[in-house]
Image: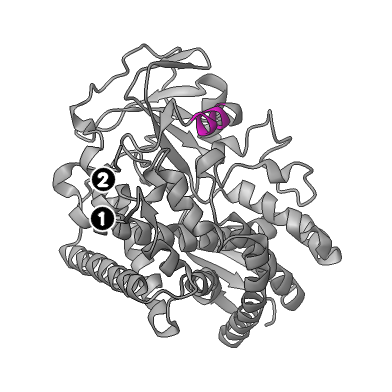
Amino acid sequence: MALTNVSETALEERSMPVGPAHPPATLYKAPIDLSHWEPFLKGQPFDVFAEMRAKAPVYWHPEPEGMGAGFWALTRYDDIRQVELDTATYSSQKGGILMNYGAPETRHPLLHRASLDTMICLDQPYHMPLRREHMSFFTPAYVAELKTKVDAHVTQLLDGMEKAGPIVDMVEHFSAELPLFTLCEILGVDPADRPKLVKWMHYLEVAGHTMAQGDEIDPVFFGEFVQNVIDMFEFGKRELLARRAEPRDDLLSAIANAEIDGAPLSDEFLDGSWLLIVFAGNDTTRNSLSGTMRLLTEFPDQKAKLIANPDLLPNMVHEAIRMVSPVMYMRRTATEDTVLRGQTIAEGEKVVMYYGAANRDPQVFEDPDRFDVERANAKDHIAFGLGPHVCLGQRVANMQLESAYRQILTRFPDISWTGKQEIAPNNFVHAISKLEVDLGTG
Protein backbone atom coordinates (compact mmCIF):
# COMPACT_ATOMS: atom_id res chain seq x y z
CA MET A 1 0.00 0.00 0.00
CA ALA A 2 1.47 3.37 -1.03
CA LEU A 3 1.93 6.15 1.50
CA THR A 4 -0.87 8.72 1.42
CA ASN A 5 -0.38 12.17 2.89
CA VAL A 6 -1.70 12.21 6.45
CA SER A 7 -3.10 15.70 5.90
CA GLU A 8 -5.38 14.36 3.16
CA THR A 9 -6.76 11.50 5.24
CA ALA A 10 -6.74 12.91 8.79
CA LEU A 11 -9.96 12.53 10.72
CA GLU A 12 -12.21 15.58 10.46
CA GLU A 13 -13.00 15.79 14.12
CA ARG A 14 -15.54 18.59 14.02
CA SER A 15 -18.00 16.07 12.57
CA MET A 16 -17.47 13.58 15.41
CA PRO A 17 -19.93 13.28 18.31
CA VAL A 18 -19.10 15.72 21.11
CA GLY A 19 -19.40 13.16 23.88
CA PRO A 20 -17.83 9.70 24.32
CA ALA A 21 -19.51 6.67 22.78
CA HIS A 22 -19.31 4.89 26.14
CA PRO A 23 -20.07 6.56 29.50
CA PRO A 24 -17.06 7.58 31.61
CA ALA A 25 -16.38 5.37 34.62
CA THR A 26 -16.46 8.43 36.91
CA LEU A 27 -18.45 11.68 37.06
CA TYR A 28 -15.33 13.63 38.09
CA LYS A 29 -14.88 16.99 36.32
CA ALA A 30 -11.44 18.59 36.12
CA PRO A 31 -11.28 22.12 37.57
CA ILE A 32 -9.45 23.52 34.51
CA ASP A 33 -9.79 23.33 30.73
CA LEU A 34 -6.76 21.35 29.56
CA SER A 35 -7.55 22.11 25.92
CA HIS A 36 -6.77 25.83 26.40
CA TRP A 37 -3.37 27.41 26.97
CA GLU A 38 -4.40 29.72 29.82
CA PRO A 39 -4.05 27.17 32.70
CA PHE A 40 -0.46 26.56 31.57
CA LEU A 41 0.80 30.16 31.73
CA LYS A 42 2.35 29.61 35.16
CA GLY A 43 3.60 26.11 34.41
CA GLN A 44 2.07 22.67 34.22
CA PRO A 45 -0.93 22.04 36.52
CA PHE A 46 0.69 19.23 38.49
CA ASP A 47 -1.84 19.58 41.32
CA VAL A 48 -4.69 18.96 38.87
CA PHE A 49 -2.83 16.03 37.33
CA ALA A 50 -2.47 14.51 40.81
CA GLU A 51 -6.21 14.88 41.40
CA MET A 52 -6.97 13.30 38.01
CA ARG A 53 -4.63 10.37 38.68
CA ALA A 54 -6.49 9.68 41.91
CA LYS A 55 -10.07 10.30 40.80
CA ALA A 56 -10.21 9.74 37.04
CA PRO A 57 -6.97 8.38 35.55
CA VAL A 58 -8.79 7.80 32.24
CA TYR A 59 -10.77 11.04 32.14
CA TRP A 60 -13.16 12.20 29.44
CA HIS A 61 -12.33 15.82 28.69
CA PRO A 62 -14.82 17.76 26.56
CA GLU A 63 -13.43 20.33 24.15
CA PRO A 64 -14.84 23.85 23.82
CA GLU A 65 -17.79 24.28 21.50
CA GLY A 66 -16.78 24.31 17.85
CA MET A 67 -13.31 22.83 18.44
CA GLY A 68 -14.17 19.21 17.69
CA ALA A 69 -14.67 16.12 19.80
CA GLY A 70 -13.43 15.63 23.33
CA PHE A 71 -10.62 13.29 24.35
CA TRP A 72 -9.57 10.75 26.96
CA ALA A 73 -6.88 12.28 29.19
CA LEU A 74 -4.36 9.84 30.71
CA THR A 75 -2.35 10.76 33.81
CA ARG A 76 -0.97 7.46 35.16
CA TYR A 77 2.45 6.17 34.16
CA ASP A 78 1.39 2.57 33.48
CA ASP A 79 -1.55 3.60 31.27
CA ILE A 80 0.58 5.93 29.19
CA ARG A 81 3.23 3.27 28.84
CA GLN A 82 0.60 0.80 27.60
CA VAL A 83 -0.73 3.22 24.98
CA GLU A 84 2.76 4.19 23.78
CA LEU A 85 3.75 0.56 23.23
CA ASP A 86 0.49 -0.59 21.61
CA THR A 87 0.79 1.21 18.29
CA ALA A 88 -1.67 -1.13 16.57
CA THR A 89 -4.53 -0.05 18.84
CA TYR A 90 -3.46 3.57 19.34
CA SER A 91 -2.49 5.31 16.11
CA SER A 92 -0.38 8.39 15.48
CA GLN A 93 -1.41 8.52 11.83
CA LYS A 94 -5.17 8.46 12.29
CA GLY A 95 -5.78 12.12 13.02
CA GLY A 96 -2.32 13.29 14.09
CA ILE A 97 -0.57 13.82 17.40
CA LEU A 98 -2.01 17.16 18.59
CA MET A 99 -5.07 17.49 20.81
CA ASN A 100 -6.80 19.46 18.08
CA TYR A 101 -5.81 21.32 14.95
CA GLY A 102 -8.27 24.16 15.33
CA ALA A 103 -11.26 25.05 13.24
CA PRO A 104 -10.55 24.85 9.48
CA GLU A 105 -11.11 28.58 9.04
CA THR A 106 -8.36 29.41 11.57
CA ARG A 107 -5.70 27.01 10.29
CA HIS A 108 -2.62 28.20 8.46
CA PRO A 109 -2.84 25.89 5.41
CA LEU A 110 0.89 25.25 5.01
CA LEU A 111 1.60 24.88 8.73
CA HIS A 112 -1.40 22.61 9.23
CA ARG A 113 -0.44 20.34 6.36
CA ALA A 114 3.22 20.14 7.43
CA SER A 115 2.30 19.36 11.04
CA LEU A 116 0.52 16.21 9.80
CA ASP A 117 2.75 15.12 6.91
CA THR A 118 5.70 14.17 9.08
CA MET A 119 7.44 11.11 10.49
CA ILE A 120 5.99 11.58 13.97
CA CYS A 121 2.47 11.22 12.53
CA LEU A 122 3.17 7.95 10.72
CA ASP A 123 2.45 4.39 11.82
CA GLN A 124 4.13 1.27 10.48
CA PRO A 125 5.18 0.37 7.88
CA TYR A 126 6.08 3.97 7.02
CA HIS A 127 7.46 5.34 10.28
CA MET A 128 10.54 3.13 10.61
CA PRO A 129 12.05 3.66 7.11
CA LEU A 130 12.03 7.42 7.67
CA ARG A 131 13.35 7.02 11.20
CA ARG A 132 16.26 4.89 9.95
CA GLU A 133 17.45 7.73 7.74
CA HIS A 134 17.94 9.87 10.87
CA MET A 135 19.57 7.27 13.12
CA SER A 136 23.24 7.65 12.14
CA PHE A 137 23.17 11.23 13.43
CA PHE A 138 22.09 10.17 16.93
CA THR A 139 24.37 7.22 17.67
CA PRO A 140 26.63 7.28 20.78
CA ALA A 141 29.71 7.69 18.58
CA TYR A 142 28.24 10.64 16.67
CA VAL A 143 27.02 12.33 19.88
CA ALA A 144 30.46 11.90 21.49
CA GLU A 145 32.08 13.63 18.52
CA LEU A 146 29.45 16.39 18.61
CA LYS A 147 30.08 16.94 22.32
CA THR A 148 33.50 18.51 21.63
CA LYS A 149 31.84 21.27 19.60
CA VAL A 150 29.06 21.69 22.17
CA ASP A 151 31.55 22.04 25.04
CA ALA A 152 33.37 24.81 23.18
CA HIS A 153 30.14 26.62 22.35
CA VAL A 154 28.94 26.43 25.97
CA THR A 155 32.14 28.23 26.99
CA GLN A 156 31.51 30.96 24.41
CA LEU A 157 27.93 31.44 25.55
CA LEU A 158 28.96 31.69 29.19
CA ASP A 159 31.56 34.29 28.22
CA GLY A 160 28.74 36.31 26.70
CA MET A 161 26.53 35.87 29.76
CA GLU A 162 29.32 37.09 32.03
CA LYS A 163 29.82 40.22 29.93
CA ALA A 164 26.08 40.95 29.95
CA GLY A 165 25.60 40.11 33.65
CA PRO A 166 25.26 39.81 36.49
CA ILE A 167 21.48 39.87 35.80
CA VAL A 168 20.66 38.27 32.43
CA ASP A 169 17.86 36.54 30.56
CA MET A 170 19.07 32.95 30.39
CA VAL A 171 16.79 32.11 27.47
CA GLU A 172 18.13 34.89 25.27
CA HIS A 173 21.79 34.41 26.14
CA PHE A 174 22.00 30.66 26.59
CA SER A 175 18.95 28.37 26.46
CA ALA A 176 17.81 29.50 23.01
CA GLU A 177 21.33 29.54 21.61
CA LEU A 178 22.86 26.20 22.62
CA PRO A 179 20.26 23.83 21.10
CA LEU A 180 20.10 26.01 18.01
CA PHE A 181 23.86 25.64 17.55
CA THR A 182 23.72 21.88 18.13
CA LEU A 183 20.75 21.35 15.81
CA CYS A 184 22.33 23.38 13.03
CA GLU A 185 25.57 21.41 13.36
CA ILE A 186 23.61 18.19 12.88
CA LEU A 187 21.48 19.56 10.05
CA GLY A 188 24.31 21.33 8.29
CA VAL A 189 22.73 24.81 8.38
CA ASP A 190 25.23 27.57 7.62
CA PRO A 191 26.09 29.84 10.61
CA ALA A 192 24.75 32.97 8.90
CA ASP A 193 21.27 31.40 8.63
CA ARG A 194 21.02 30.10 12.19
CA PRO A 195 19.49 33.16 13.92
CA LYS A 196 16.46 32.78 11.67
CA LEU A 197 15.50 29.57 13.44
CA VAL A 198 15.20 31.33 16.81
CA LYS A 199 12.75 33.84 15.36
CA TRP A 200 10.71 31.13 13.65
CA MET A 201 10.46 29.16 16.90
CA HIS A 202 9.06 32.22 18.66
CA TYR A 203 6.23 32.58 16.16
CA LEU A 204 5.48 28.85 16.17
CA GLU A 205 5.20 28.73 19.95
CA VAL A 206 3.07 31.81 20.46
CA ALA A 207 0.99 32.59 17.39
CA GLY A 208 0.40 29.09 16.08
CA HIS A 209 -1.17 27.80 19.26
CA THR A 210 -3.12 30.99 19.92
CA MET A 211 -4.75 30.75 16.50
CA ALA A 212 -5.60 27.10 17.05
CA GLN A 213 -7.53 28.19 20.14
CA GLY A 214 -9.53 30.70 18.12
CA ASP A 215 -8.44 33.66 20.27
CA GLU A 216 -8.38 37.24 19.01
CA ILE A 217 -5.11 37.96 17.19
CA ASP A 218 -3.38 41.31 16.70
CA PRO A 219 -3.55 41.79 12.90
CA VAL A 220 0.01 43.15 12.76
CA PHE A 221 1.34 40.15 14.67
CA PHE A 222 -0.76 37.83 12.50
CA GLY A 223 0.82 39.29 9.38
CA GLU A 224 4.28 38.80 10.83
CA PHE A 225 3.41 35.24 11.77
CA VAL A 226 2.19 34.37 8.26
CA GLN A 227 5.30 35.84 6.65
CA ASN A 228 7.63 34.04 9.05
CA VAL A 229 5.92 30.71 8.39
CA ILE A 230 6.32 31.27 4.64
CA ASP A 231 9.98 32.20 5.11
CA MET A 232 10.62 29.14 7.28
CA PHE A 233 9.20 26.67 4.78
CA GLU A 234 10.80 28.34 1.77
CA PHE A 235 14.18 28.15 3.49
CA GLY A 236 13.68 24.50 4.44
CA LYS A 237 12.50 23.48 0.98
CA ARG A 238 15.42 25.30 -0.66
CA GLU A 239 17.97 23.63 1.60
CA LEU A 240 16.46 20.16 1.24
CA LEU A 241 16.26 20.34 -2.55
CA ALA A 242 19.86 21.57 -2.68
CA ARG A 243 20.92 18.53 -0.61
CA ARG A 244 18.95 16.24 -2.91
CA ALA A 245 20.93 17.59 -5.84
CA GLU A 246 24.29 17.71 -4.02
CA PRO A 247 24.24 15.63 -0.79
CA ARG A 248 26.55 16.44 2.10
CA ASP A 249 27.37 14.56 5.27
CA ASP A 250 24.53 16.06 7.29
CA LEU A 251 21.00 15.28 8.45
CA LEU A 252 19.36 17.56 5.88
CA SER A 253 20.93 15.41 3.15
CA ALA A 254 19.69 12.21 4.81
CA ILE A 255 16.14 13.57 4.96
CA ALA A 256 16.23 14.97 1.44
CA ASN A 257 17.32 11.63 -0.02
CA ALA A 258 15.10 9.36 2.06
CA GLU A 259 12.75 7.07 0.14
CA ILE A 260 9.51 5.30 0.96
CA ASP A 261 8.32 2.49 -1.30
CA GLY A 262 11.25 3.30 -3.58
CA ALA A 263 10.18 6.90 -4.19
CA PRO A 264 11.67 10.15 -2.83
CA LEU A 265 9.68 12.03 -0.20
CA SER A 266 6.94 14.24 -1.61
CA ASP A 267 7.08 18.01 -1.17
CA GLU A 268 4.50 17.65 1.59
CA PHE A 269 6.72 15.29 3.58
CA LEU A 270 9.78 17.45 2.98
CA ASP A 271 7.89 20.34 4.57
CA GLY A 272 6.76 18.11 7.42
CA SER A 273 10.27 16.76 8.03
CA TRP A 274 11.68 20.28 8.15
CA LEU A 275 9.03 21.46 10.63
CA LEU A 276 9.52 18.44 12.88
CA ILE A 277 13.31 18.62 13.10
CA VAL A 278 13.32 22.39 13.72
CA PHE A 279 10.70 22.19 16.45
CA ALA A 280 11.69 18.93 18.16
CA GLY A 281 15.43 19.46 17.88
CA ASN A 282 15.44 22.97 19.25
CA ASP A 283 12.48 23.76 21.45
CA THR A 284 12.46 20.92 23.97
CA THR A 285 16.15 21.17 24.92
CA ARG A 286 15.85 24.93 25.28
CA ASN A 287 13.05 24.58 27.79
CA SER A 288 14.84 21.80 29.66
CA LEU A 289 17.91 24.02 30.06
CA SER A 290 15.83 26.84 31.54
CA GLY A 291 13.64 24.55 33.62
CA THR A 292 16.71 22.95 35.18
CA MET A 293 17.93 26.34 36.36
CA ARG A 294 14.62 26.86 38.15
CA LEU A 295 14.96 23.48 39.86
CA LEU A 296 18.51 24.14 41.04
CA THR A 297 17.31 27.40 42.58
CA GLU A 298 14.21 25.91 44.19
CA PHE A 299 16.23 22.98 45.62
CA PRO A 300 19.54 24.53 46.76
CA ASP A 301 20.54 21.39 48.68
CA GLN A 302 20.54 19.43 45.41
CA LYS A 303 22.61 22.12 43.71
CA ALA A 304 25.13 21.89 46.55
CA LYS A 305 25.37 18.12 46.03
CA LEU A 306 26.19 18.62 42.36
CA ILE A 307 28.88 21.19 43.08
CA ALA A 308 30.42 18.87 45.68
CA ASN A 309 30.15 15.81 43.43
CA PRO A 310 29.96 16.52 39.67
CA ASP A 311 29.72 12.76 39.04
CA LEU A 312 26.03 13.16 39.90
CA LEU A 313 25.44 15.30 36.80
CA PRO A 314 24.39 12.50 34.38
CA ASN A 315 21.69 11.33 36.78
CA MET A 316 20.69 14.93 37.51
CA VAL A 317 19.97 15.38 33.80
CA HIS A 318 17.46 12.51 33.85
CA GLU A 319 15.87 13.84 37.03
CA ALA A 320 15.60 17.37 35.66
CA ILE A 321 13.96 16.19 32.45
CA ARG A 322 11.54 14.11 34.53
CA MET A 323 10.58 17.17 36.55
CA VAL A 324 10.38 19.62 33.63
CA SER A 325 8.74 17.28 31.05
CA PRO A 326 9.02 19.91 28.30
CA VAL A 327 6.66 18.14 25.86
CA MET A 328 3.47 18.10 27.89
CA TYR A 329 1.44 15.61 25.88
CA MET A 330 1.10 13.49 22.78
CA ARG A 331 -2.12 12.21 21.30
CA ARG A 332 -3.12 8.87 19.79
CA THR A 333 -6.40 7.74 18.18
CA ALA A 334 -8.05 4.39 18.86
CA THR A 335 -8.15 2.18 15.79
CA GLU A 336 -10.82 -0.08 17.32
CA ASP A 337 -12.99 -0.32 20.40
CA THR A 338 -10.70 -1.09 23.32
CA VAL A 339 -10.60 -1.08 27.14
CA LEU A 340 -8.04 0.80 29.22
CA ARG A 341 -8.12 0.55 33.03
CA GLY A 342 -11.74 -0.64 32.81
CA GLN A 343 -12.81 2.25 30.59
CA THR A 344 -14.18 1.43 27.12
CA ILE A 345 -12.73 3.70 24.45
CA ALA A 346 -14.44 3.71 21.05
CA GLU A 347 -12.77 3.48 17.69
CA GLY A 348 -11.85 6.95 16.45
CA GLU A 349 -11.74 8.58 19.89
CA LYS A 350 -8.69 10.61 20.89
CA VAL A 351 -6.38 9.58 23.73
CA VAL A 352 -4.07 12.27 25.15
CA MET A 353 -1.06 11.19 27.22
CA TYR A 354 0.18 13.74 29.77
CA TYR A 355 3.88 13.03 30.22
CA GLY A 356 4.32 15.48 33.07
CA ALA A 357 1.60 13.68 35.02
CA ALA A 358 3.17 10.27 34.36
CA ASN A 359 6.58 11.52 35.42
CA ARG A 360 5.17 12.52 38.81
CA ASP A 361 3.16 9.38 39.41
CA PRO A 362 3.88 8.40 43.06
CA GLN A 363 3.37 4.73 42.20
CA VAL A 364 6.58 4.95 40.16
CA PHE A 365 8.55 7.87 41.62
CA GLU A 366 8.67 8.19 45.40
CA ASP A 367 7.98 11.75 46.62
CA PRO A 368 7.59 12.74 42.95
CA ASP A 369 7.50 16.53 43.38
CA ARG A 370 10.94 16.53 45.00
CA PHE A 371 13.98 17.19 42.81
CA ASP A 372 16.46 14.49 43.83
CA VAL A 373 19.72 14.33 41.87
CA GLU A 374 20.41 10.92 43.39
CA ARG A 375 17.02 9.40 42.52
CA ALA A 376 17.68 5.75 41.70
CA ASN A 377 15.05 5.45 38.94
CA ALA A 378 15.25 8.95 37.44
CA LYS A 379 16.14 7.38 34.09
CA ASP A 380 12.71 5.70 34.00
CA HIS A 381 10.99 8.97 33.09
CA ILE A 382 9.01 9.01 29.85
CA ALA A 383 9.49 12.65 28.86
CA PHE A 384 10.90 11.40 25.55
CA GLY A 385 8.05 8.96 24.96
CA LEU A 386 8.40 5.20 24.57
CA GLY A 387 8.29 2.53 21.89
CA PRO A 388 8.68 3.16 18.15
CA HIS A 389 8.11 6.90 18.55
CA VAL A 390 10.63 7.47 21.37
CA CYS A 391 12.55 10.69 20.73
CA LEU A 392 15.52 10.11 18.42
CA GLY A 393 17.38 13.08 19.85
CA GLN A 394 17.33 12.13 23.51
CA ARG A 395 21.07 11.34 23.61
CA VAL A 396 21.82 14.74 22.10
CA ALA A 397 19.49 16.47 24.58
CA ASN A 398 21.07 14.70 27.56
CA MET A 399 24.56 15.52 26.33
CA GLN A 400 23.75 19.21 25.98
CA LEU A 401 22.25 19.49 29.45
CA GLU A 402 25.18 17.75 31.08
CA SER A 403 27.72 19.81 29.16
CA ALA A 404 25.88 23.02 30.02
CA TYR A 405 25.50 22.45 33.74
CA ARG A 406 28.97 21.00 34.21
CA GLN A 407 30.38 24.35 33.07
CA ILE A 408 27.68 26.57 34.58
CA LEU A 409 28.08 25.20 38.10
CA THR A 410 31.88 25.34 37.88
CA ARG A 411 31.99 28.88 36.57
CA PHE A 412 28.96 30.39 38.36
CA PRO A 413 28.43 28.32 41.54
CA ASP A 414 26.21 31.07 43.00
CA ILE A 415 23.95 31.41 39.94
CA SER A 416 20.23 31.50 40.72
CA TRP A 417 16.87 32.19 39.14
CA THR A 418 15.49 35.55 40.33
CA GLY A 419 11.89 34.33 40.17
CA LYS A 420 11.08 36.30 37.03
CA GLN A 421 9.99 34.35 33.98
CA GLU A 422 7.61 34.38 31.04
CA ILE A 423 5.89 31.25 29.72
CA ALA A 424 4.44 31.26 26.21
CA PRO A 425 0.70 30.58 25.76
CA ASN A 426 0.97 26.92 24.83
CA ASN A 427 -0.54 23.73 26.21
CA PHE A 428 1.59 21.38 24.09
CA VAL A 429 5.13 22.42 25.02
CA HIS A 430 6.18 24.02 28.32
CA ALA A 431 7.75 26.99 26.53
CA ILE A 432 9.82 29.29 28.77
CA SER A 433 10.33 32.43 26.71
CA LYS A 434 12.23 34.42 29.39
CA LEU A 435 14.05 33.37 32.57
CA GLU A 436 15.97 35.97 34.54
CA VAL A 437 19.04 34.72 36.42
CA ASP A 438 21.61 36.30 38.72
CA LEU A 439 25.06 34.96 37.91
CA GLY A 440 26.17 35.62 41.48
CA THR A 441 29.23 37.57 40.29
CA GLY A 442 28.07 41.03 41.30
Which residue of the protein is positioned furthest toward the left in this rendering? 105
Residue type of the residue flagged with mark 2: Asn
Write down the residue under mark 2: 5
N-term mark: 2 or 1: 2
The picture places residue 27, in percent across and down from the top left corner, at 42, 14
The picture places residue 344, in percent across and down from the top left corner, at 42, 14
Comparing 394 with 363, the one in front is: 394
Q: Quadrant of the N terminus?
A: top left
Write down the residue under mark 1: 268
Mark 2 Cα shell of 10 Å, populated few (<14), some (14-19), many (≥20): some
Locate residue 379 relative to residue 394 in the image: left or right: right
Mark 1 Cα shell of 10 Å, populated few (<14), some (14-19), many (≥20): some
Locate residue 51 relative to residue 19 in the image: left or right: right
Say whether residue 429 is visible: no
Residue type of the residue flagged with mark 1: Glu
Comparing 108 with 210, the one in front is: 108
171 to 371, vertically: above or below: below
Q: Which region is colored magenta?
A: 79-86
The picture places residue 251, in percent across and down from the top left corner, at 47, 67
Locate residue 314 relative to residue 19 in the image: left or right: right
